[in-house]
Amino acid sequence: MSVAILQWSLLAAQTMLAIGMLCTLFRMIVGPRAQDRILALDALYVVALLLLVTLGIRTNSQVYFELALLMGLLGFVGTVALAKFLMRGEVIE
């Protein structure tokens, strides 16, 4: 019984995360300012990271967890670079 509950809850979580990805993608495309688009991109990579983690739990594979860790590191660096570019107009000083 507990395996079936886990599978259904993972399916529900993945469905809600996919809906969240669609919402953040919409904000990234429609966002009125560049700051809104960067914030939506930041939220998009976090939601994609969580989707990879739930997929890793569902398939019981370590590869998805490693991809999620790599995505988290690169997403953070990308967000910092974009924020610095918006503030100063250049990334490298």
Image (spheres, rainbow, N blue to C red):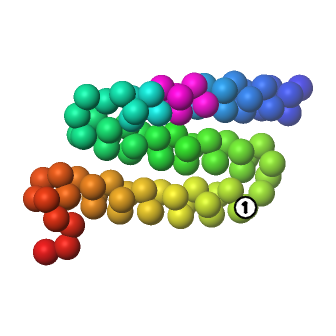
The residue tagged 1 is 62
- Check the image and name the residue furthest to the bottom: 93
Residue at image position (77%, 32%) is: 6
Judging depth in this view, the residue of 42 and 50 nearest the camera is 42
Q: Nearer the viewer, residue 59 or 47?
A: 47
What segment is highlighted magenta in the picture? 18-24
26 versus 43 height, above or below:
above
**Left or right of 40: which side holds 2?**
right
Q: Position of residue 45 (x, y in %)?
A: 48, 47
Q: Kindly tell me whether residue 2 is visible in this rendering.
A: no
Which of 54/75 is in front?
75
Q: Is residue 74 visible?
A: yes
Kind of residue sitting beneath label 1: Gln
Dividing the image into 4 quarters, which one contains the C terminus?
A: bottom left
Q: Residue at left 68%, top 56%?
A: 64
Q: Position of residue 65 (x, y in %)?
A: 64, 58
Magenta highlight on residue 49? no
State left or right for residue 7 relative to residue 56. right
Q: Residue at x 71, y 62 (%)?
A: 63
Which quarter of the figure has residue 7? top right
Horizontal and vertical percent for residue 41? Answer: 40, 43
Secondary structure mostly seen in magenta is helix
Magenta includes 22? Answer: yes
Left or right? Give the position of 42 relative to 57: left
- 36 is higher (above) or lower (below) than 71: above
